[in-house]
Image: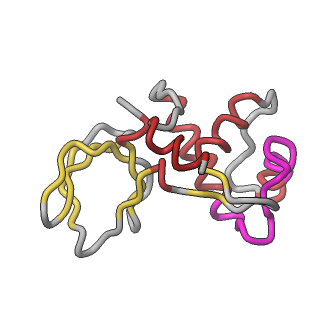
Amino acid sequence: MKYSSLMAVTGLPGLFELVNSRNDGAILRSLEDNKTQFVSNRVHNFSTLESIEIYTVNDNVNLAVIFNAMEKTTIALPNAKDNAAIKKYFETAFPDMDFEKVYASDMKKIIKWFDVLKKNNIEIKLSENTEEEAAK
């Protein structure tokens, strides 16, 4: 499973792997329970993880940059229910994050997604096209 095939879907918790796409939606496999389901694009919006950017005090950075910083830190992931601990964790793991624009709910989602990626042994690496676009 590649990082480039992973998606977040509005209204559905967790992360999904794109199995197949159709005109009216996509067939997705949940990374948490491996269930495959059809999801309509009339009801939900799809975002590939590669396309998600996070506000920083400078330029926005790709979500993969945040995940890679989280991998490098020696601090354990905080409890997802403790907003203060989550903010403190990101102040250490990625201090350039713009904490006025990135809400606690966003940070919780990042932590949950990172945990799912680690449990599924997914290498957090942008595809070459995305890396070239980020360099521009």
Q: Which quadrant of the figure contains the N terminus? A: top left
Image coordinates of residue 39 in percent, x first then y, are 23, 60
Residue closer to the observer: 132 or 21 = 132
Residue closer to the observer: 98 or 78 = 98
Q: Residue at x 18, y 52 (%)?
A: 21
Q: Is residue 2 visible?
A: yes
Magenta-span inclusion, residue 96: yes
Left or right of residue 14: residue 134: right
Residue closer to the observer: 103 or 56 = 56
Q: Is residue 32 above or below residue 101?
A: above
Left or right of residue 19: residue 64: right
Residue pushed farthest bottom? 42
Q: Residue at x 48, y 54 (%)?
A: 51
Magenta-span inclusion, residue 131: no
Q: Would you identify the image quadrant in which residue 4 lies?
A: top left
Residue pushed farthest top? 121
Left or right of residue 20: residue 85: right
Image coordinates of residue 75 in percent, x first then y, are 81, 32
Image coordinates of residue 63 in percent, x first then y, are 59, 49
Q: Residue at x 29, y 37 (%)?
A: 34
User: Which portion, as a residue range, is magenta?
Assistant: 88-106
Q: Is residue 86 above or below residue 102?
A: above
Image coordinates of residue 5 in percent, x first then y, are 35, 41
Q: Is residue 32 visible?
A: no
Q: Residue at x 83, y 53 (%)?
A: 96
Residue pushed farthest left? 23
Q: Is residue 115 above or below residue 40?
A: above
